[in-house]
Image (spheres, rainbow, N blue to C red):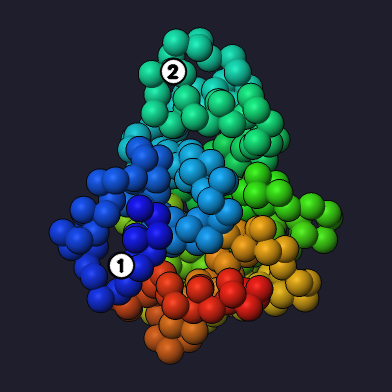
Amino acid sequence: MYKLDMIFFHPAFPASSPRRALIASGLSHCAALVHRYDRERFVTALFAPPARREALMVLYAFNVEVARIRESVHEPLAGAIRRQWWREVITGERPEDEILRHPIARPLRQLLGEGTVAQAPLVVLLDGREEDFSAEPYPDMESLEAYVAATSASLSEAAFSMLGGHGESGLATARAVGTGYGLVGLLRAMPFHGAMGRFTVPVDCLERAAIPVASYLNGRAPRDRLAMAVKEIAMRAEAHLAQARTTRPQPETRAVTLAATLASGHLRRLKRCRWDVFDPVIARPATRPVMLAINALLNRF
């Protein structure tokens, strides 16, 4: 079923296509969740070794659940309670019967118990998600990158290890890809986050673009100046991807590193739109199955 989905996972088929609905109906709960909410990681996961593909879907489903806490609750305390629940799932402190009833916690706990998934990066990811409830922009680019390193890069680290990746160089590559992809994802989601009262352009970027912080927080930043700040963040993302590409990828972890292919595609699209994140084209998913397949075949990203 995963292979069939890759064949039909093309922009020519709209998200509501009956063909897609038919394909999705044959997926596991975790895979269907990722298919719905994190389409790009779903497609990259198809390039994982078959024996590890479902485990990767479980990991990504966990990430979807945690990432969606901010939009599903209204109070930071409620978000903290949910994150704590997941932390106790990861550490094995939740009652077993409670975990068994949860369609994501159950397989995740099994993977953790088997040692297939490392506990540490998942805890770091949960801690990083606390920032989702902040109503203030990041003070500088370094703090924004630290958030992305704790969330997106930690997810890439966990996936890299799960897929049999090895060595500090390989791990650094996976984290660099995760950081670059995460920064691009924040840019694409900027209009959505702004509507929720979450602001992800660092203050130092705003200052260099001559945008008063108050104007940015009120949604009144001039789009041409905001584009300057977006470009700066995009260039940082590009630098992380370029750093990742200085090493040769490990074939077994290509499901992780292929995210760089998608991130670079989004950056090219952003550039064509003159760094205007409010252009409707920016938010559209671009799974690029043909390019992903070519890069996987040639062992590049």
Secondary structure beneath dot 1 equals helix
Is residue 192 positioned above or below 97 on the image?
below
Is 234 positioned to the left or the right of 76 in the image? right
Q: Position of residue 236 (x, y in %)?
A: 65, 73
Crowd tier of the residue under label 2, counting other residues whose Cα lies within 10 Å: few below 14, some 14–19, many 20 or above: some
**Looking at the image, is 198 positioned above or below residue 205?**
above
Give the x, y percent position of residue 32. Answer: 34, 46
Residue drawn 49% across the image and 84% down it? 268
Residue 74 pos. (x, y %): 34, 35
Measured as percent of width and height from the top left, residue 91 is found at 63, 22
Left or right: 192 as drawn, with respect to 25:
right
Who is closer to the viewer here, 81 or 22?
A: 22
At 72% from the left and 63% from the top, the residue drawn is: 250
Foreground residue among 239 and 51: 51
The residue that disc 2 covers is 100
Q: Residue at x 76, y 72 (%)?
A: 248
Foreground residue among 117 and 270: 117
Do we see residue 285 in this rendering? no
Residue on which the image places disc 1: 8
Which amino acid type is shown beneath numbered disc 2? Leu
Q: Secondary structure at mark 2?
A: helix
Say if residue 271 shows up in the picture: yes
Amino acid of disc 1: Phe
Query: How many numbered marks have been drawn onto this rendered protein structure?
Result: 2
263 lies above or below 176: below
Of tags 2 and 1, the one toward the viewer is 1
